[in-house]
Structure formats: C-alpha cells, structure tokens
Image: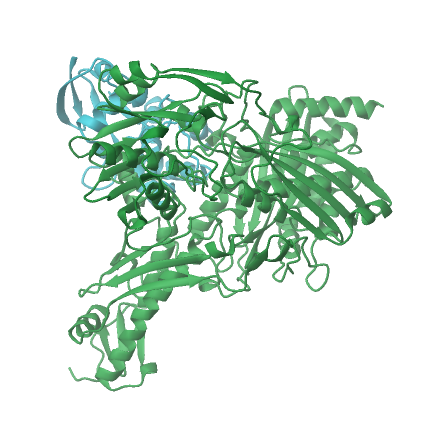
Amino acid sequence: MTRHEPRTQGKAKIDGGVASDEKHDSARKHVSGEAIYIDDMAEPAGTLHACLGLSEVAHGAITGFDLSDVRAAPGVVAVLTANDVPGDNDMSPTGLHDEPILADGRVQFFGQPVFAVIAETREAARRACRLAKIDYAEEPALIDVADAADDAKLVTAPLKLERGDSAAAIAAAPHTVRGQMRVGGQDHFYLEGQIAFALPGEDGDVTVFSSTQHPSEVQHMVAHALGVPSHAVTIEVRRMGGGFGGKETQANLFATIAAIAAKKLNRPVKLRPDRDDDMTATGKRHDFLIDYTVGFDDEGGILGVDFTYAARCGYAADLSGPVTDRALFHCDNTYFYPAARAVSRPLYTNTVSNTAFRGFGGPQGMVGAERIIDEVAFALGRDPLEIRKKNLYGTDDRNVTPYHQTVEDNVAERVIAELEASADYAARRREIAAFNAKSPVIKRGLALTPVKFGISFTATHFNQAGALVHVYTDGSVHLNHGGTEMGQGLHTKVAQIVAEEFQIDIDQVKITATTTGKVPNTSATAASSGTDLNGMAAQDAARQIKNRLIAFAAEAHDVPKDQVVFLPGRVRIGNREIPFAELIGEAYMARIQLSAAGFYKTPKIHWDRDKGQGRPFYYFAYGAACAEVSVDTLTGEYMVERVDILHETGRSLNRAIDIGQIEGGFIQGMGWLTTEELVWDGKGRLRTHAPSTYKIPLASDRPKAFNVALADWAENAEPTVHRSKAVGEPPFMLAMCVLHALSDAVASVAGHTVCPRLDAPATPERVLMAVERMKAEGAR
Amino acid sequence: MTEVSMTVNGKAARASVPDNTLLVDFLREHLRLTGTHVGCDTSQCGACVVHVNGRAVKSCTTLAASAEGAEVTTIEGLANGELHPMQAAFKENHGLQCGFCTPGMIMSATDMVARYQAAGKELTEEAIRHELEGNICRCTGYHNIVRAIQDGAAKMAAG
C-alpha cells in the first residue's frame, strides 16, 4: 500500500448522527429494567432513611412542639428541626429568604415540612412521624385567589407590560367585552417521585444523588444549608423518571434534608417521600384568575386589550415571579394587539409554593388570549378561526409584541393554513353543523388553535451552558454537559451532535451522569432550552478538539488545513485516509490536548423588566392543532374524536424524539385543560393527593384519531444548533384546541351566539354547567 | 417475621421478612431486582407490575407472603439472552421517554397478549387502550406505547 492510497473503505454515513431517528440512549436499559434511578442504587452499609413531618394547619404559629414520642420510636436515629440546620435554614431560589427548609415557629401551608425523622428503615421513619404532638395557634388563611382583597400581599414584584394606550383604544372601540376566566393548576406527577440520597465525605464534603433538573442550584442550597462552600458539595443525576418542571426547584427540600442528616450522623441518608406526601408538600402549576377587557371593530379586528393575571403562588416566591412574567409574555399568543396593557398579580396564599411546570406560565397566558378570541367571535357570530386569522401577527408590520419585541420569524399564518387544509377544517365545520342540527343530545365541536412560544430564559443570565468532552486514546469519547435527562432525549440529541462533529458512530460517545464536579454553574434544564444551550456547548468542545486535530494533522502530514476532512469513522489528510482512532493515537503521541470544556451563551437577548421592554426571546416556536369533540349535553361527558397537529421544530435533530415530545406534551396539556383538577378544601388541605382522586390522562383518553406532523419546510431563522428549534414546552399548548372544541360544542346549544366562557379544567361537571347556562341564555 | 419462598425469574428465592413486607420491597431490596419500580405506592400507576403465576399483579400492594410458593417473573426475567419481543418492540417503536413506567407497561403488555391469545380474542387497539387503564405514563401520550404493544403482540404471535 502506498501513502497515496486510501487505507480504509469508509462507510457513507455514521450511525446516530444529526437528523437521524436515533432511539433514546437508555432505551435498551429501560426495556430490560437495567436503567438505574436513584432509588435503585445499591445502598452502602449503614444507610438511613428519612421521612418528613408535615404541618396539619394552613397558617399559624407553633405553640407546642413535643417530639419525644417520635425520638423514642423504634428505629429512630435522629429527629431534625429548624434548629438542626447548621447553615442557613432557607432554600428560596430567588434570594428572597422566604422559604425555610423546615418551618421555624410558624407554618404557612397545610403540608409544610416541620421536622424530619431519620431512622434505620423507611417504614420506621414513616411510623415515627405520626407520633409528633404539635399545637398551633391558627391564623386566618387565604387559600383561593378569588378571595384575595384588592391590596392582598404579593410574593414578589408584579410586572406590567404596556404598548400604546389600551384604555383609550378600548373606550373608542365599536364593541367591548369584559370578562373573567379561571385556569386550574396541575400536579406534575413525574412517575419517579422526588428523591435524594446523600453520602457524607471527608472535611465538609457531601455528595448528593438528587432527582433534579437543576444540580447547580441544589449544590448551592445544600452548601448554604450546611454552611460550607459550594466546592464541598457535589450533586449528581444520571436520569430522572420525569421532571416537567417539578424538579427545577422542588428537589432542594429533599436534597438539603438528606445532606444535613448525612453530615450530622456521618451515615448515608436517603429521602424518598411517598406519593401522597410528594403531592402535598411540593409545588405545582399556578392556577390563575384572568380578568380581561377587549375592544374590537365590526369585523373582529382587535383594537385594544387589558389583562390582569392573578396567580395562586403559595406562601413563597419560588419561581412565581418569572412564571407570572411568562404568562404576560404570552397574553398575545400569535395575535397582534394594536394597544395592550397586561399586569400580573403574584398573590401570596396559604398553599404550597407553586413552581415551574412545562410552559412556565406561558400556557396560562395563552388561554387568556384564546378566550378573548372566543369572546370576539361569539359577539359577532363569526367562526373563531376567522377571528384568529384576522388578528395574527404580520411579518413586516403589525409585528411588535406587548413587550416591544419585534416578531421576526413569524410562520403562524402558514402553519394554520396548512393545518386547516390537511385537517379539512371547512368541510368538517359544515358536517358538524349538519350533525348538530339533527342530534338533540350529542353535540360536536371543532376548533383550530395556534401556538407561538418564546424560547429563552427570560432571566438573560441563565442562557449559558457548559460541556466537557474527552477523547481517549482508543478514539472513544466521554461526553458530559450541564443538562439533565428526564426522558426528553436531551442526552441522545447532544450525543448525536458530538458524533456528527467527529464523524464517529454514536456508540463511540459515552453519555455520562450530570454532575456539578464536571461542569459548574449550570442553568436548570428548563425553558425548553436543554438542547439549544448544551448542544451548542458540546459542539463547541468537540470543535475545539477537532481544530487541534486538524492543526496537528496538517502540520504532521504537511498538507493545508482544509485538506484535513472528517469523514464517517475516518479522517482524510491530503490523499490519505486513516481511521479516527488512529489519528487520535498519533495526536496523543504528539502531546495534543484531547479534552475540552465547551461553552455557549445565547446571543441577541436582553430584557429590562422595570421598563417592560426588550428582546427576552431569541426566537419563537410555532404550531397549530385542530380538535373535534363530541359532548353529551345531558351529562357533560365528552370524547375527543380527532386531533390533527402541525408543529414546526426547525430542522429537527431527531424527528422520532420530537414527535414523542409533541404527542406527550399534547396529552399532558389536554389533561391540564380537561380532567386534572386540584381541589383544596376550606382548611387548605389538598384533597387530590394521589392518582385515585387526581385524574391523569390514560391510554383510553387519547383522541380516537391522532395525526401529528412536523412542518418539514421549517428551519430556525436564527443560527441555533443545526438550525433546530426547542420542542419541550411548545406542544403542551397545542391542547388548547380541545378546550375550544368543547367550547364550540357547548356554544352550539345556543346557536353560537353566546360565549360559553368555559373555564379550565373543563371537567364534565364544568361542561354540563356551561351547557345549562347556554340553555338558559339561549332561551331568553 | 415470616419465612417466604418463591421462584423468581426461574431461581429459588427464600428469606425471613417482616410479615407486612410488600412483594415489591422483597424483589427490590432482598433480591436487588430494581427494574420493578414504585411510582404511586397505591396500585394506581402500574410501575410495579410483575407476573405472579403468569398473571400481572401490582407488587406494591401485594404482600410477599401472599406470593408464597409462586412463580414470579419480573422485567429482568423476561429477556432470555436477548430481549423479549415485547421489550424489543418498546425499544424499536420509541415506546418510552423517561422509562420509569416502562417495565410495568411491558409486564402488563405481555400479560394482556397472553390472555387474549389464550381466549382466542383479537387484541385490538381499543382493547389495548382499555387494558392499559392501570398503567400511567406521564411522558409519551401513550401513542408509541400502544404501537409498541401492537408490534410486540404480532412478534409474539409469530414467534
């Protein structure tokens, strides 16, 4: 063989590169039961188990605190109270210092952790918890936002968005409608509950395995709670059994308690609450009360809007500031408001502190926008889809949002038009009208709703990410980045990106557990940003190594740099091709650094909250969905007959994963808007704290026909990683079409002349009540 | 304490455990078979489904003692060198995301296929959806899970 002949017959394409439908990286382990979640880890000898003691009143001072029976119970090793927190008894992610790890002297919601029992077994800890004798001097409790006084306490500063003079626009409008809408909350019901497992180390060190979307924040919370520097604390998570936002801040409680106990007792401590405690003691999606006024012209053109979004935030701020901000950022959905005013009311309530949940307030904001569309349509006797299309953002004009960002990448009109055609909207609208005319009890409804969702953390500094890539001398690659895997396929996509850079098969890239020891100061895997941020950081790391390899190969083989080309499994250097691993071996011998830390920060974004102006979002993700439902107007029960979805993901990195996100997000959104109802009683007790009373969608709840398509023409207007788009949250809001199809079916009872004002969740009870209202109003 | 003995994945298992030990804890803690998961603790979610004498049961509300003498199969025992056709179908059809519900889904799926085959009934898509009412998935929207079960059922019938 001469130097100029190729030494390897390479293949044309690597396995598992970008834009392949690669399976989830852990699929084989999941189907065989070999994937290890934190509760599956082998426990070292001496492992102890913790259980939380929860308050049994919603608001009041602790006047008697007798834990002697708890301490004396069999198997109990220690009982922790607020006094046992060696550092700062606070886990507020905002720095507002309003969220004690364990209640100190007073409780502010029913289910607030007051003490923790550490025992030899989980059962011993749970049994001992029941023996506490705590007396409370109860104080008045605000449970529901509808009961809040005008000057009620807020947990954080409200936001106001204002563009134009909405009061004047509304006053001058030919038509005005004012109304109110309730939108329910939602429990995450990640299948794997919260869990933390802490191992004490030497010095002040502790390692915590935490089911968290935000290892860096858990690290900081544990460090503050222990009174040690962050460098003493390592947080690791290989995978979560679902997160959905519920493990963005809510893991802090469990990790800090486990870590405090582990350090105090110098033994490993695991804390896995049972499902009822998990649902009682951790935050949920915020429910909202939305007040709105809309002014519009004879043709249904919106002239001005005024929104107030009041949210049940619970007793502490947690993420309620950015959640209620994001609600306002989505009060427009895909619609241009010539004049708009929107304000948030993040209300203090004596309930668990609500938190992030897929969409992060955006869904609640959007349902307000869609309610306004319904109001305009019914007031004028038009099809809501006509009103939707009439009020869409333009491309060259009518394109500025209430927060003064110009919408530069608008594809809503095209997405709606394509879905309207593929779902055969017009013909089905006529068929349904004919069906309803002949069907006195069962009424059908149809609706097509769009989605425009802003991508980026609105706190600009969170939009950064790091990654660590090592290439070993055999050519295999170790990949680590700051994002966490909760089932969404992030690790798979990032591995695809790295495999693509090096042109090696994906099985040569080892995905490793997220740990604060490898990539520091990370942001939560949240805001749909996981791939956008971490994929870019990993690509940067891989390119650094690749550039060193190119420089080395060019010099060593005396060819120009542009003649070093990475081909599948091999590298062409001039006229010669060598296996990737061989080049790595040569580079190592020449002392080339084969490891790199990558970094990425999102460009262009900025946000001035005080002024309510800026460009908080790098880009928008778009989609649309069309639902047909049938409603039994005597019982309120309903079926979702058919759903069609068209969603754009830019140039998809992995269509199979993206479609899975769309299907799953849609069903989860449908659950939020239909069956999932959280009920607190007058005492502030959550009465829906298990799946027996909290109705999560089942396989049989799925639409009878369910057609999901990706817009194959799509490409991100911004230079994101391979021009893809975020897909985690946007599809959740596609489910609005089900709420509006139900609204349409209900409206048919009164000839589509009265807005049903169907609140969410549209349980059969609410649907029936709306039908009854239609019958009464229609008869007038 | 109770002496329990059963056959788990073809191997004899025996231990002295507290009377109230749940089957899931016996499997996970005594035998280290951690593929069987605990999701809701109250037999709603189905993450803990195993087979006892060939029938799907929720091991989080079954006493270990009540499985005395039984043949128990867990997700780890389903594969025989290579993946069971139903396991392969879940993998091939992207019938999972976070994976936590997956073992229970697969154990319920193989049980339903076996029952329908024994009864000579067709396992329609509608029947699969109905049969899955004891298994919650929060990630996938069930679409690919149902497709996986249809595919797995066909492979089981063929093989």
Q: Quadrant of the N terminus of chain B?
A: top left
Residue at image position (32%, 66%) is A542
**For this rendering, which residue is in front, A396 or A615?**
A615
Residue at image position (23%, 78%) is A6
| Residue B52 visible in image | no
Could you tell me residue A445's position as x and y percent?
68, 34
Q: In this rendering, is residue A572 above or below A485?
A: below
Q: Chain B drawn in what color?
A: cyan
Q: In this rendering, is residue A106 above or below A165?
A: above
Q: In this rendering, is residue A736 above or below B26?
A: below
Locate residue A494 relative to residue B74 in the image: left or right: right
Q: Quadrant of residue A178?
A: top right
Count of marks overlaid on the render: 0
Could you tell me residue A510's position as x and y percent?
26, 55
Locate residue A644 relative to residue A543 in the image: left or right: right
User: Which chain shows up in green?
Assistant: A
Locate residue A280 relative to residue A165 in the image: left or right: left
* Colour scheme of the rendered structure: by chain
Could you tell me residue B32's position as x and y percent?
19, 31
| Residue A70 visible in image | yes
Q: Quadrant of the C terminus of chain B?
A: top left
**For this rendering, which residue is in front, A500 or B85?**
A500
Residue at image position (16%, 20%) is B6
Could you tell me residue A12's position as x and y percent?
32, 68
